[in-house]
Image (spheres, rainbow, N blue to C red):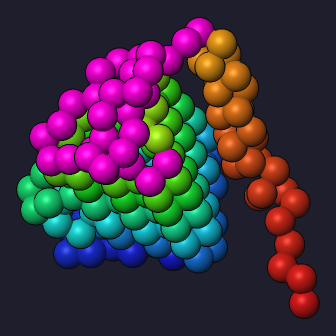
């Protein structure tokens, strides 16, 4: 993993979490317990602050950043799909942010909300709890059903288990 202190701002990463060797974590970043950070992810707390809650998966090539003096807060058990961008936003517990989606400045995504793949949650937009949104800009599509929550709670355990499995079993092939 590539972890950098920047101007006295030092990342805090829980021992139980896993940060892939080519992911980058810079500055004022707090990563909770059992967080999996995938290949190519960039989490920059260089002039803003980033908080990533327990059990969250930050998948391959995600970018998390914040404006100067502001925060990006990712809740517990959140799934950030491949190549999504989260910037000065708040993502509440158990939310799912689809691949290549953007959640931008001062937006808020509620508990168990889903942002469909390739969507853009605009500046200041609020996605209500238990709501699926999609499109550019993101608009309400449907409600999240209980069976979805059961299924995704199970999916989230896969990435949480990767924290141990990657530490114990990932080997570079030479």
Depth check, front residue: 133 or 38? 133
Residue found at the very far left of the displayed protein: 69
Residue drawn at (77%, 58%), measured in percent from left and top?
A: 167
Q: State the extent of the magenta-drawn residues as a range.
A: 117-146
**Percent of width and height locating residue 135:** 36, 45
Depth check, front residue: 23 or 91? 91
- Is residue 90 magenta-colored? no
- Is residue 142 magenta-colored? yes
**Percent of width and height locating residue 78:** 49, 36
| Quarter occupied by residue 47 | bottom left
Residue 10 horizontal side relative to residue 174, left or right:
left
Residue 125 horizontal side relative to residue 160, left or right:
left
- Residue 145 visible? The answer is yes
**Percent of width and height locating residue 121:** 27, 45
Say if 108 sits above or below 5 in the image.
Answer: above
| Quadrant housing the N terminus | bottom right
- Residue 49 visible? The answer is no
Depth check, front residue: 38 or 111? 111
| Quarter occupied by residue 69 | bottom left
| Quadrant housing the C terminus | bottom right
**Percent of width and height locating residue 166:** 77, 57
């Amino acid at each position: 993993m590539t972890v950098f202190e920047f101007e006295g701002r030092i990342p805090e990463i829980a021992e139980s979490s896993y940060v892939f060797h080519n992911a980058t974590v810079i500055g004022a970043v707090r990563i909770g317990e059992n967080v999996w950070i995938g290949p190519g992810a960039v989490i920059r707390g260089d002039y803003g602050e980033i908080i990533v809650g327990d059990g969250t998966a930050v998948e391959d090539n995600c970018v998390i950043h914040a404006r100067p003096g502001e925060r990006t807060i990712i809740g517990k058990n959140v799934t950030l799909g491949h190549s999504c961008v989260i910037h000065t936003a708040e993502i509440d517990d158990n939310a799912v942010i689809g691949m290549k989606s953007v959640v931008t400045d001062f937006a808020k995504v509620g508990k168990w909300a889903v942002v469909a793949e390739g969507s853009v949650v605009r500046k200041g937009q609020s996605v209500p709890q238990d709501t699926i949104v999609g499109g550019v800009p993101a608009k309400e599509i449907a409600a999240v059903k209980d069976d979805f929550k059961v299924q995704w709670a199970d999916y989230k355990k896969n990435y949480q288990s990767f924290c141990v499995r990657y530490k114990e079993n990932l080997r570079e092939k030479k």
